[in-house]
Image (tube, rainbow, N blue to C red):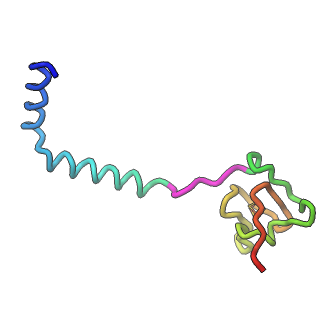
């Protein structure tokens, strides 16, 4: 580290107390984390969604299906109970 850069760091250190700096970083981190969705749904195209069953497998028997909302927990958009996609995961019986 050069002498000038060391002086610059020392000057910055004096002008912005560390406690304030870390408080602001922590606040900004929390703010960005709280506004981000925990996960994003995949598109129907990505998961090769189709509105008809596949080999007897259908959304109505998939663990990701939300029947009342006609939605899926992992695939975006309106989902048919008779649909299917590559993320199909059968409900445990
Ligand atoms: S088969 Fe695919 S679209 Fe249908 S509920 Fe399961 S994960 Fe969602």
Q: In which quadrant of the rendered view does residue 91 lie? A: bottom right
Magenta span of residues: 37-43
User: Residue 49 appears at what percent x and percent y?
Assistant: 80, 53
Q: Is residue 4 above or below residue 57?
A: above
Residue found at the very far right of the displayed protein? 55
Q: In which quadrant of the rendered view does residue 3 lie? A: top left
- Across the whole image, how many numbered discs are drawn on residues? 0
Magenta part mainly helix, strand or loop?
loop
**The quarter of the picture showing ligand 1:** bottom right
Residue 30 lies within the magenta run: no
User: Residue 48 appears at what percent x and percent y?
Assistant: 80, 49
Q: Which of 14 and 92 lies nearest the eye of the viewer? A: 92
Quadrant assignment for the C terminus:
bottom right
Residue 90 falls left or right of residue 9: right
Q: Which of 50 and 88 lies nearest the eye of the viewer? A: 88
Residue at image location 70% in from the left, 67% down from the top: 64
Residue 25 falls left or right of residue 67: left
Residue at image location 84% in from the left, 62% down from the top: 83
User: Residue 88 appears at what percent x and percent y?
Assistant: 77, 61
User: Residue 77 appears at what percent x and percent y?
Assistant: 71, 56
Q: Is residue 81 above or below residue 1?
A: below
Residue at image location 11% in from the left, 37% down from the top: 13
Residue 48 falls left or right of residue 18: right
Quadrant assignment for the N terminus:
top left
Residue 40 lies within the magenta run: yes
Residue 56 falls left or right of residue 92: right
């Amino acid at each position: 580290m050069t002498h000038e850069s060391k002086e610059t760091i020392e000057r910055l250190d004096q002008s912005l107390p560390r406690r304030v700096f870390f408080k602001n970083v922590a606040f900004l981190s929390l703010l960005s984390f709280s506004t981000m969705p925990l996960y994003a749904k995949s598109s129907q195209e990505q998961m090769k969604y189709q509105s008809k069953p596949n080999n007897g497998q259908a959304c109505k028997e998939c663990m990701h299906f939300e029947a009342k909302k006609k939605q899926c927990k992992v695939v975006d958009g309106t989902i048919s109970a008779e649909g299917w996609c590559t993320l199909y995961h059968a409900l445990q019986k």
